[in-house]
Every structure is written in C-alpha cells, then in structure tokens.
Image (tube, rainbow, N blue to C red):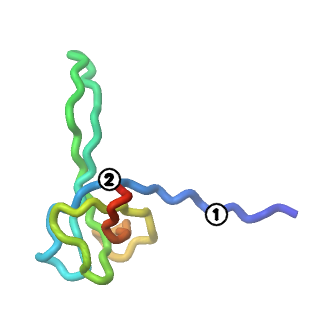
Amino acid sequence: MAEAKTPHKKTLTGSVLTSGKMDKTIVVSIERLAKHPFYGKYVKRRVKYMAHDEKNECGAGDKVVIVETRPLSKARPTSSSPPSATLS
C-alpha cells in the first residue's frame, strides 16, 4: 500500500519586530546573508513576515520560529511558535 505523504512545512527563525500594535499578529524579521553578484561581499537581506500569535505571548525582540500554514487572513500565511531559549 502507498502511504500518504505529508507536505513539508517551511520553517524560518527570526526576531519579532512589533507585537503590541495588532491583536494576535506579530511581525517577524528574517535576516540572511547573500553574496553580492559583482563585488562578492556578503550583505544582509531582510524579509518581514506577518505571523499569527494566538495568545499574544511574543514581545518585541523575541526569537521565534514561524511555520508555514494555511492562510489565516490575507496577510498572514504563517503561524508562530512561542519564544524559546533553545531556538537561538
């Protein structure tokens, strides 16, 4: 019998930029290093995602892991896990 495959969920680690302005929503900044195509120097690239925070427990500056989920609203395609000391 063929087993049903579960789709791989994308996870990203980043820091919370804002949390108090919106209810159950946080803005998470994901930074990565990318090599400049001409100069070869590594530059920081930043992407901001809006994530769902059901209990409003994340604060600004917390490290969180966001997981790809079904769209909860137009702007929130991800959900966050609570901040943890092991995720640095």
The type of residue carrying mark 1 is Thr
For marks 1 and 2, give the one nearer the viewer. 2
Which residue is located at x 17 percent, y 72 percent?
A: 19
Residue furthest front as drawn: 85
Q: Which numbered tag is attached to residue 88? A: 2
Q: Are marks 1 and 2 in contact (CB under 8 Å)?
A: no
Q: Is mark 1 on a helix, strand or loop?
A: loop
Residue furthest top as drawn: 39
Which residue is located at x 38 percent, y 54 percent?
A: 12
Left or right: 29 as drawn, with respect to 79: left
Left or right: 37 as drawn, with respect to 86: left
Residue 61's image quarter? bottom left
Compared to residue 87, the image places residue 36 above or below, namely above
Q: Position of residue 45 (x, y in %)?
A: 23, 40
- The residue that disc 1 covers is 6
Which residue is located at x 51 percent, y 59 percent?
A: 9
Q: Which numbered tag is attached to residue 25? A: none
Q: Is mark 2 on a helix, strand or loop?
A: loop
Q: Where is residue 22 in the image (x, y as percent from the top left)?
A: 16, 78
The type of residue carrying mark 2 is Ser
Q: Where is residue 36 in the image (x, y as percent from the top left)?
A: 24, 24
Q: Earlier in the sequence, mark 1 or mark 2?
A: 1
Compared to residue 73, the image places residue 44 above or below, namely above
Compared to residue 88, the image places residue 73 above or below, namely below
Residue 76's image quarter? bottom left
Q: Distance between the residues labelled 1 and 2?
A: 27 Å
